[in-house]
Image (cartoon, grey):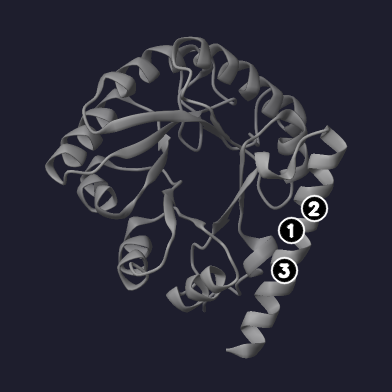
Amino acid sequence: MTDRKDELAENLAKVERRIAAACAAAGRSRDEVTLIVVTKTYPASDVRILAELGVRHVAENRDQDAAPKAADCSDLPLAWHFVGQLQTNKVRSVAGYADFVQSVDRARLVTALSKEAVRQERELGCLIQVALDAGESARGERGGVAPGGVEELAGLVADAPGLRLAGLMTVAPLTGGYAGRQREAFERLMDLSTDLRRAHPAANMVSAGMSADLEEAVAAGATHVRVGTAVLGVRPRLG
C-alpha cells in the first residue's frame, strides 16, 4: 500500500504542476481551478489514499461501481461527482450519494432527479452536459444536449425542487467541427457559460478538460478539470 500511496502522490504532484503552470500561463489564480479525480475502475482503497493526499473531489461514471465505493468511503470528506450517461432507472441510487450530477441532458432526467432528491431530502448540484458534436437540436454521441437546448434545460433544472443548477460540462468531441480542436471547443463552452450566467448567476461551474487536454481547458476558463489516468494510471484490461 505504501508503494501505491507513493505512486499516487507522485502522479498528483505532476498533475498539480500542470494545473499550476496552465493557470500561470492563462493569468489565472491556481485556486480558480478545482481538480476532480476520476476514480472509475479503481478500488475504494485508492479513493482512501487520494483523500489522505488531500483530494476532495472524486468522479465516477457507472453507478454499479460508484454506489458501493461511495458507501465504503462515506466517512471521508469527499464530494462525489457522477459524470457518466445516466439512465433514469439508476437515478434513485445515484441521488443517494452524488453531490453533483454532471451529465444532465434531457427533461426526463431532470424530473427523475428532482423526484429522488426531494424523496431523499438531498440537494443535487446539476451540470448541463453540452454536446459540441451535435447539431443545434440533436444529442451527442456520448450524451449531452446541443448548444441550442441549454437554455431550456437549464430553466427546467433551476425550477426543479431538490436540484441546484451548478453550471455546464462538456467532453472534447471526437467528431464534428470541434474534433481535434479542444481549445476552441472549451472556448465555445465558456461562451455558453457566459450566456447561462446572465439568467442564472450562481451557475458558475465549467467542467472541462481531462488528462490529455487539461491545459486547453484551463486556458479557456474551466473551473473544474476531470483527471483520471494522469493520477491513477492506465489500468490493464481484464482477460
Res. 155 visible in picture: yes
Residue matched to label 2: 18
Q: Quadrant of the N terminus?
A: bottom right
Percent coordinates x, y for residue 133 in the rendering: 59, 26
Percent coordinates x, y for residue 80 in the rendering: 42, 54
Amino acid at circle 2: Arg
For image coordinates 16% across by 37% down, the residue present is 118
The residue nearer to you, when weighing 34 against 235, is: 34
- Distance from disc 1 to disc 3, alpha carbons, whole Å, reads 6 Å
First in sequence: mark 2 vs mark 3: 3
The residue nearer to you, when weighing 55 against 227, is: 55
Classify mark 2: residues with Cα within 10 Å, few (<14), some (14-19) or many (20+).
Answer: some
User: Dot 1 lies on which element?
Assistant: helix
- Distance from disc 2 to disc 3, alpha carbons, whole Å, reads 11 Å
- Distance from disc 1 to disc 2, alpha carbons, whole Å, reads 5 Å
For image coordinates 40% across by 67% down, the residue present is 76
Among the 4 quarters of the image, the one containing residue 177: top right
Left or right, 183 with reference to 239 = right
Furthest residue toward bottom: 2
User: Dot 2 lies on which element?
Assistant: helix
Percent coordinates x, y for residue 190 in the rendering: 64, 22
Residue matched to label 3: 11
Among the 4 quarters of the image, the one containing residue 75: bottom left
Left or right, 161 with reference to 83 = left
Amino acid at circle 3: Asn
Disc 1 and disc 3 in contact, CB within 8 angstroms = yes
Residue matched to label 1: 15
Q: Is residue 57 above or below residue 137?
A: below
Res. 181 visible in picture: no
Disc 2 and disc 3 in contact, CB within 8 angstroms = no
